[in-house]
Every structure is written in C-alpha cells, then in structure tokens.
Amino acid sequence: MKLLAIASAVLITLAGNTLAMAETANTRAQVNAELAEAIRTGDIVGPGDSGLKLNELYPNQYPAVAKVAGKIRDQVKAELAEAVRTGEIIGVNMSARKLNQIRPDLYPPVGKGPGNTREQVKTELAEAIRTGDIIGPGDSGLKLKDFYPHQY
C-alpha cells in the first residue's frame, strides 16, 4: 500500500514538472520571437547614453513605423467639454475622485446598465462569506481570508 502511494506521488510530481518545462519552453520561444522582432525593427536601445532606440538613431536602416492617427483639436475640445458637462474630470482635492462622484447633485446621473438580480447578489454574498472574500475588522482593508488564512 505504501509503495502504491509513493509511486502515485512520484507520477504526480513528474507530470507537474513536465507541464512546467513545457510552459517554460513556450515562454522561452515567445521571448526569442519578440527579441528577433525587436532586432529586425530596431526597437532596442542603441549604444551610448542617449537612450534612443536603433530605429531612432539610424532610421534609414529599419522599416518605417506606421504612425497612429491622433485626434484633431476639435475632437479633443469636444471630449473635454463633454467631460466637464458630465463631471467626468478629476476634482481639485487630493482624493482623485471625479467631480460627479464628489457632488453628484450637480451633474446628470451616470447611466448604468442593468444590475444583478436580488438572487444573484445573495448568491455572490454567500460565496464571499464562504471564501472569506469580505472586508475584515478594523481599518486595514484586509479581507477575512487574509486575517484568518487557516479558516479559508
């Protein structure tokens, strides 16, 4: 019986090691492919202290990089006006909250999609309680599973 348990443990360990080696080989192949692409396009830092990439130092030796079209001035101004109108800009205090979060009475309500049903919320709460994924005591912000890891 002990021999069977030991053999099972060895087989499980070997299977885990094989999977880890396959993942490492896959990751290594990805990294090598990314490096080859960076060398081909000159997207690696060149010599010296300039911090410029090879394709910036020697643009005639590498393929041109396609530029992404930016927004025109009128588009940016329209987006800013809409953000100001709806309060979607950061407030002046240090809280990093948006104006419509600080003073929701001054801005139009933010449209939200359909929420969860009562049953869905109750199910989620039960699961959070079961797994300790709810805020624990005090002001630390830690969850119960972090306070009492042996219970979850």
Image: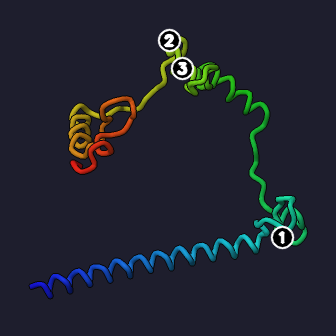
Pointer 1: what residue? 62
Question: Viewer-proximal residue, 100 or 57?
Answer: 57
Pointer 2: what residue? 105
Question: Viewer-proximal residue, 54 or 149?
Answer: 149
Sequence-wise, which precedes: disc 3 or disc 1?
A: 1
Quick one: SS at disc 2?
Answer: helix
Quick one: SS at disc 3?
Answer: helix
Q: In this view, does 152 lie to the left or right of 49?
A: left
Q: Which quadrant of the figure has residue 122?
A: top left
Quick one: SS at disc 1?
Answer: loop
Q: Where is residue 50 in the image (x, y as percent from the top left)?
A: 87, 59
Q: Position of residue 67 (x, y in %)?
A: 78, 54
Amino acid tagged 3: Asn
Sequence-wise, which precedes: disc 1 or disc 2?
A: 1
Q: Residue at x 30, y 31 (%)?
A: 137
Q: Which quadrant of the figure has residue 14?
A: bottom left
Image label count: 3
Say above or below: 84 vs 52.
above
Pointer 3: what residue? 100
Give yes or no for contact between labels 2 and 3 (Cβ–Cβ under 8 Å): no
Q: How far apart are marks 3 and 1 (CA)?
A: 48 Å
Q: Which mark is residue 131?
A: none
Crowd around label 1: few <14 · some 14–19 · many ≥20 (10 Å): some
Q: How far apart are marks 2 and 3 (CA)?
A: 8 Å
Amino acid tagged 2: Asp
